[in-house]
Amino acid sequence: MNQQASLQATLLNPGEGTWLQAFGDELIFHLTGEQTGGQCCLFTDITPPGGGPPPHYHLNEDEWFNVQEGRVSFFAHGQWRELGPGGIAFVPKGLVHTFKNTGTVNSRMLVTTSPAGFEVFMKRCADEFNRDGGPDMSKIPGIAAEHGIHFVQD
């Protein structure tokens, strides 16, 4: 029996999943590599106004973003473009990108990464952000690099 045949269906109600906080965002991981046989990770990313990651690229994962609430500007190919609810962004691995909540309320996006593994990176970051005394930000680039994620200068 192959791995695909041994996977079980995963059924979740809204809000179910593993909740993490890192980089000022709240993340709800609905599907992880454990549930998808490593194929993908699916999560909700709730970002406060003005929030978003620094420019970066992934060596391993392609990413899909579906803006559900708010206004989010995406940077890719040297340009910014704002998307509202229903907007979709695809960012292939290797492409420098970022996003920023440009609205006045929290944005909400449904994000898919493929293959899975991004959830492991975010769990490690959440552990650092939530430790007593706050995060040691000098550790974040090293954690990211271990997961094939590299930050670049603006």
Image (cartoon, rainbow, N blue to C red):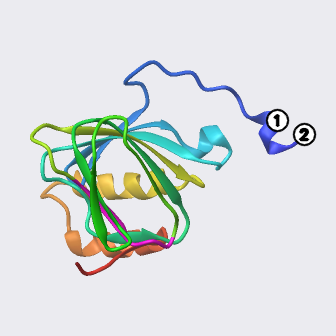
The local secondary structure at tag 1 comes to helix
Which stretch appears magenta?
A: 94-100
Amino acid carrying label 2: it is: Met
- Residue at 30% across / 68% down in the picture? 79
> Which numbered disc covers residue 117?
none
Q: Nearer the viewer, residue 63 or 23?
A: 63
84 up-or-down from 57: above or below: above
- For disc 2, the marked residue is 1
**Residue 6 placed where, x, y %?**
79, 35
The local secondary structure at tag 2 comes to loop
- For disc 1, the marked residue is 5
85 up-or-down from 112: above or below: above
On the picture, is 100 further left or further right than 16? left
On the picture, is 141 further left or further right than 2? left
**Residue 145 placed where, x, y %?**
43, 75
Label 1 environment density (alpha carbons within 10 Å; few <14, some 14–19, many ≥20): few
Amino acid carrying label 1: it is: Ala
Labelled pair 1, 2 in contact (Cβ < 8 Å)? yes
On the picture, is 78 further left or further right than 5? left
